[in-house]
Image: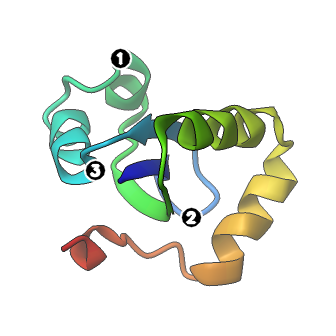
């Protein structure tokens, strides 16, 4: 399984979009300050959106698509499933 995820620094805060095949491991890296300099600098640790994909190609294609979206579209996507911008890390099994 492959994942496209959006992290946020807070509600309507700075966003980070990434792709991984191990979401828990990737979140642990981000939260320990080793996943991305951008995430570390802006303290972006809240998992606000997560999508599963069957292939790495599909996940990468979706990640690139989301990165091209304007900010309002990204916010609408997040709020369509997570209106409070809650950290969804606890939903990862």
Quadrant holding the C terminus: bottom left
Mark 2 crowdedness (10 Å alpha carbons): few <14, some 14-19, many ≥20: some
Label 3's element?
helix
Q: Quadrant of residue 60?
A: top right
Q: Earlier in the sequence, mark 2 or mark 3?
A: 2
Where 6 falls versus 85 (above or below)? above
Which color scheme does this rendered protein use? Answer: rainbow
Q: Are marks 2 and 3 in contact (CB under 8 Å)?
A: no
- Residue that label 1 marks: 37
- Residue that label 2 marks: 11
Label 2's element?
loop
Residue at the image point whose x is 18% and y is 34% from the top: 29
Q: Quadrant of residue 19?
A: top left
Residue at the image point whose x is 72% and y is 43% from the top: 66
Marker disc for residue 23: 3
In the image: residue 11, left or right of residue 3: right
Mark 3 crowdedness (10 Å alpha carbons): few <14, some 14-19, many ≥20: many
Q: CA distance from mark 1 to mark 3?
A: 18 Å
- The nearer-to-camera label among 2 and 1 is 1
Residue at the image point whose x is 68% and y is 75% from the top: 79
Label 1's element?
helix
Q: CA distance from mark 2 to mark 3?
A: 21 Å
Q: Quadrant of residue 39?
A: top left
């Amino acid at each position: 399984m492959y994942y496209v995820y959006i992290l946020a620094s807070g509600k309507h805060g700075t966003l980070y979009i990434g792709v991984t095949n191990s979401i828990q491991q990737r979140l642990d890296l981000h939260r320990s300050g080793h996943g991305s300099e951008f995430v570390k600098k802006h303290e972006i640790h809240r998992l606000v959106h997560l999508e599963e994909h069957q292939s790495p190609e599909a996940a990468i294609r979706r990640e690139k698509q989301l990165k091209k979206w304007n900010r309002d579209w990204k916010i609408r996507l997040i709020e369509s499933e997570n209106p409070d911008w809650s950290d969804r890390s606890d939903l990862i099994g």
